[in-house]
């Protein structure tokens, strides 16, 4: 979401597992850095009082939020073809259509993000193996609280517990899985085969059922509560 930027490491967590083997985190950070003309990077200082200057985004990808400078870039990338005006002699203007090299299939993007959200919440499969996280999926008592009889505001070190146990990609997934799911309409996609669309639809349906019909939905509410996002 353009309203909730992720750190580079959190964005990396959404890279499909099949691609991660050939794309280490630091290399991914370098790729993202090459897009700095259209992306902005913001240093995260909250939670790091003793480390105000961690280095550049490549050496400290968990410390830099990344987002597009302007929402218009996202609109531009959604256009498959560009209408280019060319002025001719005698003041006439012709319009030429050219493929957009930055074109993004939004239906596929939302579908992949929806799958990523469910995989991260249910199994942590897109985050396991990272240096700073052992398991990022939803689970019972995710912050290891000693008692459930206290309000969040009564837990003295809650902020530190949340930072240590609930990574940015899990917070994002908990907040935006509905957003991406509603925009991943398989029936409107024309670029893939019917078999692929049916497979994707079945996979998303299975993930949604597992999420809503098991204890994961309760773990999800716990994460929303601990991060102060129940009213989101």
Image (tube, rainbow, N blue to C red):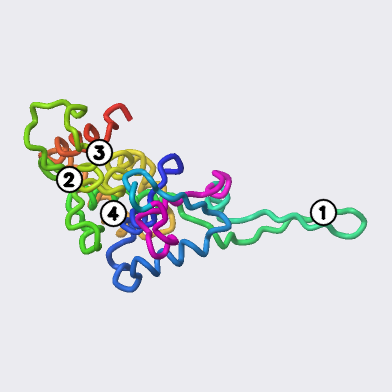
Measure how far apart labels 3 and 4 are at the Cα level: 37 Å
Element assignment for label 2: loop
Which quarter of the rendered picture does the C terminus lie within? top left
Q: Which residues are magenta?
A: 52-74
Measure how far apart labels 3 and 1 are at the Cα level: 59 Å
Question: Around disc 4, counting alpha carbons within 10 Å, would you say few (fewer than 14), some (14 to 19), or many (20 or more)?
Answer: some
Q: Which residue is mark 4?
A: 200
Q: Which residue is mark 1?
A: 93
Q: Is residue 45 above or below residue 94?
A: above
Frontmost residue, 27 versus 178: 27
Measure how far apart labels 2 and 3 are at the Cα level: 18 Å
Left or right side of 46 for 153? left
Frontmost residue, 194 versus 154: 154
Q: Earlier in the sequence, mark 1 or mark 4?
A: 1
Label at residue 159: 3
For discs 4 and 2, the disc positioned in front in the rendered view: 2
Element assignment for label 3: helix
């Amino acid at each position: 979401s353009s309203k909730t930027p992720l750190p580079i490491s959190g964005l990396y967590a959404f890279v499909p597992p099949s691609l991660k083997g050939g794309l280490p985190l630091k290399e991914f950070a370098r790729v993202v850095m090459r897009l700095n003309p259209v992306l902005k990077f913001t240093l995260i200082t909250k939670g790091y009082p003793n480390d105000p200057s961690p280095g550049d985004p490549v050496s400290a990808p968990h410390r830099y939020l990344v987002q597009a400078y302007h929402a218009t870039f996202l609109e531009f990338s959604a256009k498959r073809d560009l209408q280019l005006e060319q002025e001719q002699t005698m003041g006439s203007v012709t319009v030429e259509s050219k493929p957009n090299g930055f074109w993004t299939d939004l239906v596929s993007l939302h579908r992949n993000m929806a799958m990523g959200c469910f995989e991260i919440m249910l199994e942590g499969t897109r985050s396991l193996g990272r240096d700073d996280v052992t398991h990022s999926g939803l689970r019972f008592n995710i912050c290891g609280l000693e008692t459930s009889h206290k309000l969040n505001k009564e837990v003295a070190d809650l902020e530190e517990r949340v930072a240590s146990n609930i990574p940015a990609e899990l917070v994002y997934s908990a907040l935006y899985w509905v957003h991406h799911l509603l925009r991943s309409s398989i029936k409107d996609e024309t670029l893939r085969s019917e078999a692929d669309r049916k497979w994707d639809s079945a996979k998303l349906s299975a993930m949604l059922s597992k999420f809503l019909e098991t204890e994961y939905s309760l773990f999800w509410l716990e994460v929303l509560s601990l991060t102060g996002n129940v009213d989101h």
